Each structure stands twice: as C-alpha cells, then as structure tokens.
Amino acid sequence: MSKQQRFTITAALPYTNGPVHIGHLAGVYVPADIYARYLRLKGKDVAFICGSDEHGVPITIKAKKEGISPQELVDRYHTMIGDSFEEFGISFDNYSRTSAPIHHETASAFFTQLYHDGKFVEKVTEQLYDAQADQFLADRFVVGTCPKCGNPESYGDQCEKCGTSHNATDLINPKSAITGNQPQLKETKHWFLPLDEYSEWLNQWIVEDHATDWKSNVVGQVKSWITDGLHPRAVTRDLDWGIPVPVKGAEGKVLYVWFDAPIGYISATKEWAARENKNWEDYWKDEDTSLVHFIGKDNIVFHCIIFPAMLKAHGDFILPENVPANEFLNLEDDKISTSRNWAVWLHEYLQDFPGQQDVLRYVLTANAPETKDNNFTWKDFQARNNNELVANLGNFVNRVVVLTNKYYGGVVPQPTGLEPRDKELLEKIKTYPGNIGGSLERYRFRESLAELMHLSSLGNRYIAEEGLEPWKLVKTDPEKVQNIMYVCLQLTAALAVLSEPFLPHTSKKLRHILGLSDSVSWETVESEKALLAAGHQVQKSQLLFSKIEDEQIQAQLDKLATTKANNTTQNPKLMPQKDETQYDDFMKMDLRVGEILTAEKMPKTDKLMVMTVDTGIDKRTIVSGIAQHYKAEDLVGRKVTVLVNLAPRKLRGVESQGMILLAEDPEGKLVFVNPDDEILNGATIA
C-alpha cells in the first residue's frame, strides 16, 4: 500500500435504469466499502465517492418503454439505489448524481478546457441513422454482431460477452433498437479524443510500470486493446438527454456518457468537500493522494484507457494508483441478467432478510469473483451463515459473553499468572491486524476475510480444548478459568475491531455488548495494551447471527423458478420484419447443404467455434458463435445449411468463409436449420 495518508476511493457509478443486484455488490461496492472502512480504521483521510449515472442511453430506452420522462426514471432509481446502499451499510462519504448542477458545471468545464487546449479532433463522420425514428443512433440504440467474438447481441459501444469496446459502425448487421430497422449512414459532426496519441504512454504506465502490482485481468485487457490499436473516440453524441456540448455549432449534441460519467467522481468530491469544509483539489490534484477505482471487468477500458487519457490531456489531475477490477458473479449457475429478471435485487433482499445485511456481505466477500467468474447459490448462502457465522463466530462470542456474565457478573476478570498457552494466544492475536491488513492492501478480500474467521476458529479451539473447558474447570480451578476468560475477552474485543470492514453491523453490535470504546483501534489490537482491562463491565449477550431455515431458502428458490418459468413461456422477442427486398437480390444468396468435418473451440473466446465444412464444392473454414451451445465433438458429422457466397470476414484473426444458418429458440439457445441427412453435400437450397 501507498504510504500516503489521503485516499480518494471511487466505486463505479450505477446506471439509474434499475435497482442494484448482488453482481454489482460483489464486483464493486462490497470490496470498495471494505477497503474504505479499513483505511479509516487505520487513521487515513478517506473520500469514498460514488453516485448515480443518469445520462446513459439505457435510461432513455427504459423511460420510453415506461412512457415517462428520463428525469422521472432517474429520480425513482436514484432514491431506491441510494436508500438500499445506506441500509446495506455501504459507507460512501458522498453519493451524488450526474444530473446535479455541480456535475453539469464540472463536466462542461472539463470539456471546455480540453477543447480550448486543442486536445480534441473535430470530424464529420458517417454515423448510423434511423430514418423511421428520425434520429442518429447512439451506442445502445444499436445492436448487432460483435466483430470480435461473434455475439449477435452486442451493443454499439461495447460487447458484454467479450468486453470489447468498439463503435456502432463496427457492428455486423446493425439494427436500430428503436424500430428494429437496418440503419443507414448519415453525416454528422463530433469531437473525438485521439486515444491513439496516448498508446505509448498507456503502454508504459500500465502494461510495463504496473505489470506486477495491478491485477492481471486489467493489465491483460489494456495490453490487448493497445496491441489491436487504439483509435480516436467520440466524446459527443447526437442525443437530447445529457449534458449539452458547451461549444458553438453543437446544438442537439450532448457529452458522451462515458466522458461525463467518470467526471462524476470529481463533481461528487466537490459536492462533499463543500459540505465538509474541505478542499476538493487535495483529493484530485495532490500527488500525496492515492486514487483507487473499484470497478467490474466490463468497465476496464473506460477506467484504464479513456478516463486516464482524459486526465492526462487535462494535465491537472492525479492518475489512479490501482484499478482492482473484479470478474462477474453468476446466480445459480446462470449469468445474472436484468432483462430476464435473473438476479437477487438488493432492495428485495433487505425486505426478505431484515437485519441480516452482514450475512450477504460475508457470503459475497467469501465468494468474491476476484480472479474468475464465481457463482452465488442460495444453498451456499444458507450453509455459510449457519456453519460459519452462526457456528463459528457467533458461537464463540456468545459463549464468552454468557460465561463472563455467569461467572463474574459481566466484569472482565483479573488474570492470575498467565500460562504459556494463554500468552501464546495473546501474542497471536496481535499478528492478525497485519495479516488481514496485508491482504486488504493487495485487494485480496477473500483471503483477508478468511484470516478473520481463522482468528475466531482459534478462539473456539482455545475455549473448548479437552480438559480446559471453563465450564468444567470453574469449580476445581477457578483461577485458571479467570485466565481463560480474560484471554477470550481480549480475542472477542479484537474480533469486534477487525470485523468492522467486513461486518459493520455486527461489529457495532459487538462493540456495544463489550462496551468497547471507539478509541480501541486497529493499532490497539497490535499493541501491548489490553483491549478490555480487568474490572471492565460488559453487557448481556445478544445473538450476533441467527440460523437461516430451509423454508427461507426455498422461498428464494421458488422465486427464481417462477422467473425462469416466465422467461420460458413468454413469447420470444421477434425482430420486426426487415425492409422489403427484391426477388433478384434474394436469388443472389447461394445456400447449400454442408457437413461439418472438424470443430474446435477458438482459444481465449467463450463463444467462437472454428469448423471445417464440406460444402460439396469445396472444404472451407467457417467461424460461428455457437461454442456456448454445442460441444465440438457433437458437431462433427452434422448436416447444416451454409451461405457459401458470403464475403469472407476475419474473426479474431481467422478468416470465416461463409455462414451457417441458425435459429434462436424461446430460451435463447441457438439451433441449426438442418437439412435432411440423406441430401448430398453441395445440394442447392432453393
């Protein structure tokens, strides 16, 4: 960790087109909160910043569907998200919003400075335009096939399957998300940030200088984008919802959401600093400040290429010390999907499990997707609560407090000649702040939580060691019991302090039970000072955790089963009829019966399958995005319908020489349009 005393910690701004779910929590908000709480316990000056991202195209799409204004939509979800974060215990110093006047002012001023400094390239380009809707199609108003991985449902700015950032005009077979029509190209003027001019600097700063201290997924993605070649990125859009571009000749244009959103970190800090009578520039312009961005892997390009290039172009701001991006969290072995309602929503969890915020925090941290995608299941949630929180941590604390009240009226006993076993445990307790903190400073949250629970396990073994159980010794050797209970109370106090970043509600409750002063800090646990002095009064015991019953879990599983059933029985989303075509155009397509001879999943992709296909007229390579639906060994020998005269196209460096026809069933599975097995390869399909 940096030796600096001041930290600016940002958590990715959530879109206000829906509530927050467990994937967001596990990927961004829980680890960011743990880190911020830890730094505060260490006495650091922390600004933990977040806010609602209210200018994204998904917001305008959702508002149109609901027949309300974008402002009404963002007002609703800003309140819901903010309230849920607060109840859950995410300790933002400021949770702002990008519709706030201070943000409009900050983002406009940022753009204006770069504009006057000549950092932008002004270009008239051809952009996708929907003639029926009479508007240019920005980013998420366009869907099509990803040019990199073949995902047929890629957005115009980014593919959520492979994480690639691109322009809408790069998509294969683009469609308007408004009307379903194929858009046309039309000229429009925009301002571009020439990312290619920052390639060498980005490569040096991240790929070389941070190769060992940043996560490999972050460095790897950045290296891949730089290797593929960075291109100028438009920072303005043709939209009527957002921050107006503050220059002449830009009427009807707004700042690109991924230009204005990260500036929201700065404007939110300004808002907080004004309220707290602090200087916001200390947190964004002082080299003695460490800036850390917590994000999910789908935001790496924006926080490690676009935003740093913006900051570099501006010249006045510090750059991030680290960007610890997490992978994705799945739910019951299926990808979390807001459109399919396949999620555990935070506001619903808080209603269904009142007072059990820390249980979800614990499970999401213990199962955090730090280096690979991970899976959340309700059975695992129940098991971790009952077997780890209740039976380990809760059991130890309850035993200690109950016995202290039973034997000593709640007063910490005076130790009388500690034995080697007692002294050894007291010394071991002092090592845990360093163990836990060391893991947190390397952004290893699962490891740090495991250290905390290991300390609790030590306490359970110590108090229940054969022949040394205090409830058995109290009548025969009361002085030894005084020693045992004194040591156990010190360990319990250490747990109260060290659990605060992970289990803040539990820590608060435990501090109250122990009557533990706020002055007992992280450093106190490491010191020679007793955490609870002899003669100190503790309160009656309260259960820290309660067992979660099968009925509660079954209710959640039933809810998901209903969601899955609804998704299955709903009519599949059908694309509107395409534009009318002429018979002569249709006859240009050469459809043939083919047979798959070989099949192999393309390395380093989730979706692409490379096949050799006998078309009757030749044997050719065809790349298709079916690897998530079929195993390679099941494809060999299958008859397929092939469009053989499609112009070749490279996908991830492999030239695909045709297209295999597929349909999508109601559950989203791709299925072949199969000719009869008896038909010869090369037969024409009329």
Image (spheres, rainbow, N blue to C red):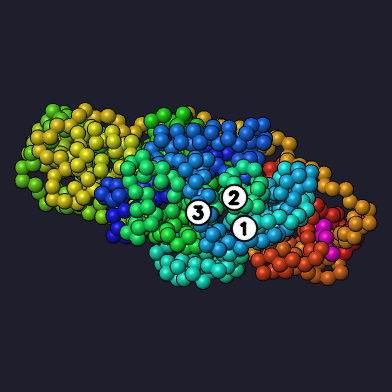
Residue corresponding to mark 2: 245
Q: Amino acid at mark 2?
A: Val
Q: Are marks 1 and 2 in contact (CB under 8 Å)?
A: yes
Question: N-terminal of the two: label 3 or label 1?
Answer: 3
Q: Say which of 378 and 24 sits in front.
A: 24
Q: Amino acid at mark 3?
A: Phe
Q: Which residue is mark 1?
A: 191
Q: Which residue is mark 3?
A: 110
Question: In front: 677, or 431?
Answer: 431
Residue nearer the viewer, 594 or 587: 587
Spatial distance from mark 3 to mark 2, Cα to Cα? 11 Å
Residue that sits furthest to the left in the current view:
417
- Identify the element where label 2 is drawn: loop
Visible residue check, residue 269 = yes
Q: Counting other residues with Cα less than 10 Å from the Cα at mark 3, is it few (<14), some (14-19), or many (20 or more)?
A: some
Residue in the picture at 43% in, 40% down: 95
503 with respect to 408 (left or right): right
- Magenta stretch bounds: 640-645
Q: CA distance from mark 3 to mark 1?
A: 14 Å
Distance from disc 1 to disc 2, alpha carbons, whole Å, reads 10 Å
Mark 1 is on which residue type?
Answer: Trp
Location of residue 628 (image quadrant): bottom right
Find out whether residue 642 is within the magenta segment. Answer: yes
Total numbered labels placed on residues in the image: 3
Give SS at disc 1: strand
Instruction: Check contact, mark 3 vs mark 2: CB within 8 A.
Output: no
Q: Earlier in the sequence, mark 3 or mark 2?
A: 3
Classify 10 Å Cα crowding around label 2: few (below 14), some (14-19), many (20 and above). Answer: many
Q: Is residue 535 left or right of residue 209?
A: left
* Residue 346 relative to residue 585: left or right: left
Is residue 181 among the parts visible in the rendering?
A: no
Q: Counting residues from the N terminus, which is met first, the one under dot 1 or under dot 2?
A: 1
